[in-house]
Amino acid sequence: MKDYDPKMSFSDQAAAIFHDHRGDETGAVNFLKSVAGAGPVLELAVGTGRIALPLAQLGLAVDGIDFSPEMVEQLRTKPGGRDLHVEIADFVDVDVPGKYSLIYIVWNSFFNVLTQDGQLRCLENVAAHLTDGGCFVVEAFVPSFLHKLDNDQQVQAESIEAGAVRIGVLQHYAATQTIEQSHVSLSREGIRLDPVAQRYVWPSELDLMARMAGLRLQARWGGWNDEPFDSSSDSHVSVYVR
């Protein structure tokens, strides 16, 4: 995507419309609490606190990292949002103080790292900040659906209202394992583009990079509620240990 800067995807406009509820929050928080031990806990790409805040409400000490001040500003406006320690930084390389019994990243945010080298550095950074026996949890989509696209493209109506229409457009580049998307909003006020680019990885590649970083796969599920992971799964929740 020419002239794309990842910060474009998490600007003040994006923060204002960010989905704080996907419907899976209870399952995600309960799952993470079950593997966190006594804590502390660190969320990569903490965003507006969709998962971190309810997890902290269960009594765990939760820190966060996010490179978007606008997203973190939204987090601060919520109950408990000012109690979380959040670093404004790129989670790939940031050296946070201390170690954590659980580090996690959700909702495909790991794919926002656009190179394999960057993804591997992220995993190495995670391993360096886990306690002995600590866990790293990744939630991400399984990219099998991309092979079903027509000419590696997709156009989809995301919402249709009387005064506004939101359309998602996607281009897939199999050779580089990247997708480029834009959420296009059409309304009486005009046109707004919300672009995003990602480098996806198959679970097997993620496992290999994790091993290179000193982590090993402990368990993999098809969702937050311990759904079995199999060839029909469109997402995975993977647990790695040091």
Image: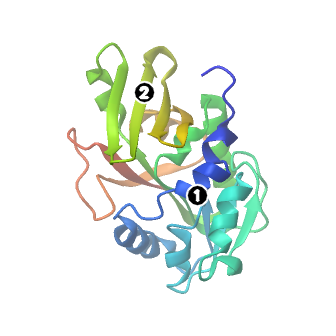
Tag 1 secondary structure = helix
Tell me the crowding category of disc 1: few under 14, some 14 to 19, or many 20 or more residues within 10 angstroms, Cα based.
Answer: few
Does 2 sit above or below residue 145?
above
Q: Which residue appears farthest toward the front when viewing the image?
A: 188
Image spot of residue 185 (x, y percent)? 47, 39
Residue that mark 1 sits on: 16
- Callout 2: 10 Å neighbours few (<14), some, many (20+)? some
Q: Is residue 185 above or below residue 45?
A: above
Identified at 24% across, 58% down, the residue is 227
Q: Percent position (x, y) of residue 220?
A: 35, 52
Query: Residue 213 location in percent, x, y?
Result: 61, 43
Q: Is residue 215 visible?
A: yes
* Most foreground residue, 152 or 166: 166
Does residue 227 appear to the left or right of 74 in the view shown?
A: left
Identity of the amino acid at label 1?
A: Ala
Residue 234 at x, y = what percent?
Answer: 28, 42
Front: mark 1 or 2: 1
What residue is disc 2 on?
Answer: 170
Depth check, front residue: 211 or 68: 68
Structural distance between the alpha carbons of marks 1 and 2: 22 Å
Give whichever of 173, 128 is nearer the camera. Answer: 173
Taking 26 as reference, is 234 left or right?
A: left
Counting residues from the start of the chain, the first of labels 1 and 2 encountered is 1
Residue at the (69%, 81%) spot, across then down: 83
Quarter of the figure with residue 168: top left
Residue 218 vertical position relative to residue 27 in the rendered view, above or below: above
Residue 232, placed above or below residue 51: above
Quadrant holding the N terminus: top right
